[in-house]
């Protein structure tokens, strides 16, 4: 039996579409608000860190920490000399 235009409930379909659009708009608003909030939080943290490092009297462009004395291999623990010959793998 074919559906006739008189048998379709246009008001029900319109109400469903309106509710779906409201849900989508609400979700979009929530996502945009969250992204904006998190971005503002990250920017504020970055600015706070930048202000602290700029106001630090001991702050310099180079690291103030001196590197540990290291052996010729660059290993602070072993301090072994570099091999002079390559040994074949077994």
Image (cartoon, helix red, strand yellow):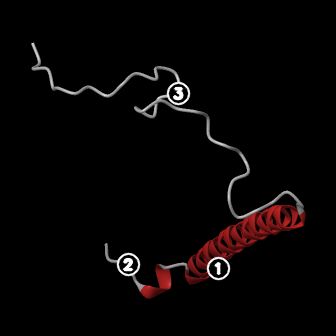
Image quadrant assignment for residue 22: bottom right
- Residue 78 rendering spot, x and y as whole percentages: 46, 20
**Which mark is first along the chain, 3 or 2?**
2
> Above or below — where is 61 with respect to 24?
above
Which of the numbered marks, if any, corresponds to residue 76? 3
Quarter holding the N terminus is: bottom left
* Of 64 and 5, the residue lying toward us: 64
- The residue under the point 84% across, 67% down is 54
> Above or below — where is 7 with respect to 77?
below
* Of 8 and 23, the residue lying toward us: 23
- The residue under the point 72% across, 69% down is 39
Residue underneath mark 2: 3
> Above or below — where is 14 with respect to 38?
below
Task: Assess disc 1: are there few (<14), some (14-19) or many (≥20) residues with their C-alpha within 10 Å of its C-alpha.
Answer: few
> Above or below — where is 89 with respect to 51?
above
Which of the numbered marks, if any, corresponds to residue 18? 1
* Number of the front mark, 2 or 3: 3
| Residue sitting at the far top | 90
Image quadrant assignment for residue 81: top left
Image quadrant assignment for residue 52: bottom right
- Residue 70 rendering spot, x and y as whole percentages: 52, 32
**Which mark is first along the chain, 1 or 3?**
1
- The residue under the point 60% across, 82% down is 14
Task: Assess disc 3: are there few (<14), some (14-19) or many (≥20) residues with their C-alpha within 10 Å of its C-alpha.
Answer: few
Horizontally, is 1 left or right of 53 in the view? left
- The residue under the point 68% across, 59% down is 62
């Amino acid at each position: 039996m074919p559906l006739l235009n008189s048998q379709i409930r246009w008001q029900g379909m319109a109400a469903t579409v309106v509710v779906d659009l409201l849900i989508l708009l609400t979700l979009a608003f929530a996502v945009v608000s969250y992204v904006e909030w998190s971005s503002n939080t990250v920017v504020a943290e970055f600015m706070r860190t930048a202000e602290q490092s700029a106001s630090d009297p001991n702050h310099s462009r180079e690291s103030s920490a001196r590197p540990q004395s290291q052996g010729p291999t660059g290993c602070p623990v072993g301090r072994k000399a570099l091999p002079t010959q390559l040994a074949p793998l077994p």
